[in-house]
Image (cartoon, helix red, strand yellow):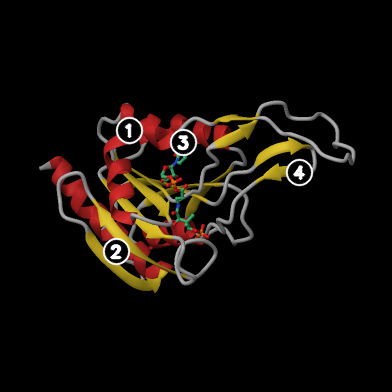
C-alpha cells in the first residue's frame, strides 16, 4: 500500500554491481544482483518520495514510478550521482562499487594466450567524495563485511562522513549478495548500533526509510 511519509523528499538510490571493462566482451564484476537497492527504490516510491535509481546492470524489472538511470562502471556511476547531488535530499548507496578498474582497456577482443596480466588502478570512492562535500543531504551507505561487521562499518561511517550505514554480513548464506533476505546493523556517527534480524529485503528497505525520515526531520530541527 502507498503512504505519503516521504512526500517532498528526493532520494537517489544506487544499486547493482558496477562492471569494469577488460575488452569489448569481458568485464570485472561482482555478485550484487541489485535486489537490495531496487527494494529501497520501490519502497521509497510507495512512501511518496521522488526516487532516482542509478543502477549498474541487473536482471531486475525497473520499479514503477522511479526515474531510472542506467550506468555500468564506477566512473559512470560517479558521474550520474554527482550530477544530481545538489538536487537531492538523500543518497542511499546500496551498489557494490568496484574498487579497481582496468588501466588499459583493449579496443578489440583479446585473443587466447597461455597467461596474461591485467593491471588495475584504484577507482574513486563515490560515497567518500559525496561525504567530503555534504551540505543539506542525508548520506546513507552500506558496508559488505565478512568479519568485524560493526567495527569495520563504524570506520566507514567516520571515513565517509555518513549519517547512517547499513552493515551487512555477506558471509551468511541468507544475507547480502543475490538473496531475497538480509540482516545486519544500522550504524550512526552519534548513536548506538541497532541490530536488524534477518528479514525480506523489502522489509529491511522500509526500516531503512523510517530511519531516513527521522534523520531528515532532525536535520531540519
Ligand atoms: O545487490 P544485492 O544482491 O541485493 O546485494 C546487496 C549488497 C550486498 C550489494 C548490499 O547490501 C551492500 O552491502 N552494498 C554495498 C557493497 C559495498 O560495495 O560495500 P563496501 O563496503 O565495499 O562499500 C562501502 C560503501 O561505499 C557502499 O555504500 C558503496 O556503495 C560505497 N562505495 C564503495 C567503493 C567505491 N569505490 N565507491 C563507493 O561509493
Q: Position of residue 147 (x, y in %)?
A: 38, 56
Q: Earlier in the sequence, mark 3 or mark 1?
A: 3
SS label for mark 2? helix
The quadrant holding residue 163 is top left
Q: Which residue is mark 4?
A: 26
Q: How many neighbours does mark 2 have within 10 angstroms: few (below 14), some (14-19), or many (20 or more)?
A: some
Question: Label 3, label 1: how many angstroms apart (C-alpha)?
Answer: 13 Å
Residue 204: percent from the left, percent from the top?
35, 66
Q: Label 3's element?
A: helix
Q: Which residue is mark 2?
A: 207
Q: Along the horizontal axis of the image, is 37 left or right of 62?
A: left
Q: Is residue 84 above or below residue 171?
A: above
- Marked residue nearer the N-terminal end (3 or 4): 4
Using the numbered discs, state the Cα–Cα distance from disc 2 to disc 3 in whole angstroms. Answer: 23 Å
| x then y, percent, for residue 181 | 44, 71
What label does residue 81 carry, if any?
Answer: 3
Q: CA distance from mark 3 to mark 4?
A: 25 Å
The correct choice, above or below, for 204 with respect to 103 in the image is: below
Q: Label 1 crowding class (10 Å Cα cut-off): few <14, some 14-19, many 20+?
A: many
Q: Quadrant of the C terminus?
A: top left
- Residue depth check, mark 2 versus mark 4: number of the one nearer the observer: 4
Instruction: Look at 46% across and 63% down and name the residue there.
Output: 171
Q: SS class of the residue under badge 1?
A: helix
- In the image, what residue occupies the spot 53% across and 57% down? 34
| Residue at horizontal 44 percent and vertical 31 percent from the top | 82
* Residue 131: image tag: 1
The first of marks 2 and 4 along the sequence is 4
Disc 1 to disc 4, how far (Cα)?
A: 32 Å
Q: Is residue 124 left or right of residue 213?
A: right
Q: CA distance from mark 2 to mark 4?
A: 37 Å
Apparent side of residue 49 relative to residue 189 in the rendered image (left or right): right
Which x, y percent locates residue 111?
A: 89, 38
Amino acid at each position: 500500500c502507498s503512504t505519503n511519509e516521504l512526500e517532498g523528499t528526493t532520494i537517489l538510490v544506487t544499486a547493482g554491481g558496477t562492471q569494469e571493462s577488460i575488452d569489448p566482451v569481458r568485464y570485472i564484476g561482482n555478485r550484487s544482483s541489485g535486489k537490495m537497492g531496487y527494494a529501497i527504490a520501490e519502497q521509497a516510491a510507495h512512501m511518496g518520495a521522488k526516487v532516482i535509481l542509478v543502477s549498474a546492470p541487473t536482471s531486475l524489472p525497473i520499479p514503477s514510478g522511479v526515474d531510472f538511470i542506467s550506468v555500468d562502471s564506477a566512473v559512470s556511476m560517479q558521474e550520474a550521482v554527482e550530477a544530481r547531488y545538489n538536487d537531492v535530499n538523500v543518497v542511499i548507496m546500496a551498489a557494490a562499487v568496484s574498487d579497481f578498474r582496468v588501466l588499459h582497456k583493449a579496443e578489440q577482443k583479446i585473443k587466447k594466450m597461455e597467461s596474461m596480466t591485467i593491471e588495475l588502478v584504484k577507482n574513486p570512492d563515490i560515497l567518500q567524495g559525496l561525504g567530503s562535500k555534504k551540505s543539506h543531504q542525508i548520506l546513507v551507505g552500506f558496508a559488505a563485511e565478512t568479519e568485524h561487521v560493526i567495527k569495520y562499518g563504524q570506520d566507514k561511517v567516520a571515513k565517509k562522513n555518513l549519517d547512517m550505514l547499513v552493515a551487512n554480513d555477506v558471509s551468511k548464506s541468507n544475507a547480502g549478495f543475490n538473496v531475497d533476505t538480509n540482516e545486519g546493523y544500522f550504524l550512526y556517527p552519534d548513536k548506538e548500533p541497532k541490530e536488524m534480524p534477518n528479514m525480506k529485503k523489502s522489509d529491511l528497505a522500509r526500516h531503512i526509510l523510517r530511519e531516513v525520515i527521522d534523520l531528515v526531520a532532525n536535520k531540519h530541527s
